[in-house]
Image: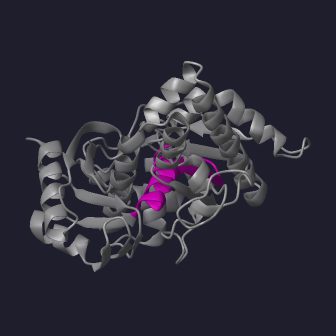
Amino acid sequence: MLSESEAAVAKTVLIHGPISRATLATRLGLSPASLTRLTRPFVDRGILIELDDVAEGVGRPSRPLEISSDLGSFVGVKITGEHVYAVLTDVRARLIGEHVVALDSHEPADVLDAVKTAVERVSGSTPPPVGIGVSLGGITDGTTVEWASFLEWTDVPFGAILEEATGLPVRVENDLVALTEAERWFGAGRGLDGFAVITIGAGVGYGLVAGGTVVRTPDSGIGLGGHIPLDPHGPICQEGHRGCSQAMLTSGSIAAQAAMALGRPVTYDEVLDLAQGGDRAASAIIHSSAQALGRLIALAANLTLYSDVVLAGEGMRLFDVSEHTVRAAVIESRDPRSSEVRLHIDDSGFTGWARGAAAVAIQDAFVRLD
């Protein structure tokens, strides 16, 4: 097991590398001698590599440090009610491959079979991955799914079962927490002290990084971002809340509103297509949803005092179709003296969710280094 200082060195090079020794020492508050003592074992073992000399002002040239690209691959798995989405990544969560398996049942044994199949197919003939990350909507403790409403699971030791079936280390994490970790380590949040993450799709999710750390509480997996009031005249969600974020922004609610207005069943993407084509009913629904999204973004920035917001999730086409309306609603909901909200768009959909799971597997691998 790494010491706290060793783990900090490895993590900082992974996130910010290539990085000069001087910058690394400054970030971590270490003396040059201490940094050399901490990095030498990593270099000797091939975990860190030294790049060509780079001049850094006065004095001897420095050899920047970078994480080795030969540290193996990682599998990330996102479980929904209908599918298992799997990705294979390198140590920086860069995509190598992906595979999707349909779920025919929510029984733990059947989900296990689907996940095993997805892991085997996405890994292919490559050497076995270093570890597996699994993400889903619900409450987990790293290995046990304590509660997942869409799977109707309570206290299912899915991580232990999958570890036994694959022989690989497994971490099970709430999907929003995993996605937020991926943005912090490998995405738009690299180098930021704090930012919010908002996801739209089958649900509405909210994550937060403060002081460089993902905020985790016992409420993190409940989905509290789904019922924030956004429109007093909006539709009613299944919990009876009028105009909440779930009612205004989820793909199912948007499709249901359009179906009622049009008198026929439609999908989420069809509603967006109709709105782009000028259909009045669809356009009105999408306009209201876009305004609600802008209000939610502004609310996140207003309450956290952070100006960076990452937008992600499989429903991101709403933003693509109505970006101007969303941005206008953000401005209208902010004090004119406040900082401009910087939106970071992740439109990778389910691939992004699965990549978040891979990111927590990578984090676990670095914790296990010795």
Q: Is residue 135 above or below residue 339?
A: below
Image location (x, y in percent) of residue 314: 44, 42
Task: Tell me what residue is drawn at x 73 percent, y 51 percent.
Answer: 233
- Left or right, residue 302 beside residue 241: right
**Residue 343 placed where, x, y %?**
65, 38
Query: Could you say where residue 10 lies in the image, as x and y percent from the top left?
Result: 42, 56
Which quadrant: the N terminus?
Answer: bottom left
Q: Is residue 97 above or below residue 71?
A: above
Q: Is residue 340 visible?
A: no
- What colouring method underlies this structural image? one colour
Q: Is residue 195 visible?
A: yes
Q: Residue furthest right?
A: 337
As drawn, is 108 to the left or to the right of 135? left
| Residue at 36% across, 64% down | 150
Is 267 magenta? The answer is no
What is the magenta range?
174-201
> Is 6 left or right of 339, judged from the image as shown?
left
Q: Residue furthest bottom?
A: 155
Q: Nearer the viewer, residue 59 or 323?
A: 323
The residue most toward the top is 277
Res 292 quadrant in image: top right
Residue 244 lies, in percent from the top left, at 64, 57
Residue at screen point 86% across, 45% down: 338
